[in-house]
Amino acid sequence: MNSFADGPARWEKLGHTSLLKTRVFDVQSIRYRHPMRQTERDFIVMDSPDWVNVLALTPDHRLVLVRQFRFGVDAFSLEIPGGVMEPGEEPVAAGLRELQEETGYTGTGARLLGCVQPNPAIQSNRCHFVLVEQAVRSAAMAWDTDEEIEVTTALVEEVLAWARSGRITHGLVLNALLFLQPHWAELKR
């Protein structure tokens, strides 16, 4: 049985080797040494840019949703708009850009609700959650080459119920809805 009197040890990073570079992420083999046991191991890490997901709330309290085919699960997924942040781009600016590009919606009062590490065991990036209020369809969409998106809206309570029932399964969308709940509770008063 392991005993961590002062908590788990912080491993020492010794170096890394690039294993694969793709347009979406880079795969690194990173060599670490345990400070007490002096054992060394290679760990695989996927380096990706940060992402942003947008909770766009319309004046009548509906969330803007997108439905699109996702290659990882070979199925359609109901989500909120979002995507990859450009180098040096701030989360709120990226959120507004992604919202407009994917849905044609724009809005006001955009602000960062929070961020998470999608999978810190193997990924180095973060996903930021941006709330945009008074969202209305007012601009042209500008999809990426391989994007085909169905844009819809649904009442916030309905979307939260879909999350609880398993109709929405995207983990980062579920995280975003968790960050939305306190704000939504205030709006409902």
Image: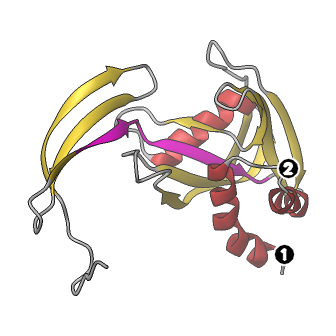
Q: Which mark is residue 188?
A: 1
Q: Nearer the viewer, mark 2 or mark 1?
A: 2
In percent of the image, x 59 and y 53: which residue is there? Answer: 130
- Which quarter of the picture shows residue 138? top right
Q: Quick check: 43 above or below 162? A: above
User: Most prominent secondary structure in the magenta stretch?
Assistant: strand
Q: Disc 1 on helix, strand or loop?
A: helix
- Taking the image as shown, residue 60 lies to the left or right of residue 90, namely right
Alpha-carbon span between mark 2 and mark 1:
24 Å
Q: Position of residue 115 (x, y in %)?
A: 50, 58
**121 in the magenta segment:** no
Label 1 environment density (alpha carbons within 10 Å; few <14, some 14–19, many ≥20) = few
Tags 2 and 1 in contact by the CB under 8 Å rule? no
User: What amino acid type should be assigned to the residue bearing mark 1?
Assistant: Lys
Which segment did they paint magenta? Answer: 42-57
Q: Disc 2 on helix, strand or loop?
A: loop
- Taking the image as shown, residue 142 lies to the left or right of residue 23, namely right
Q: Nearer the viewer, residue 62 or 164?
A: 164
Q: Position of residue 183 (x, y in %)?
A: 69, 71
**52 in the magenta segment:** yes
Q: Position of residue 93 (x, y in %)?
A: 51, 42
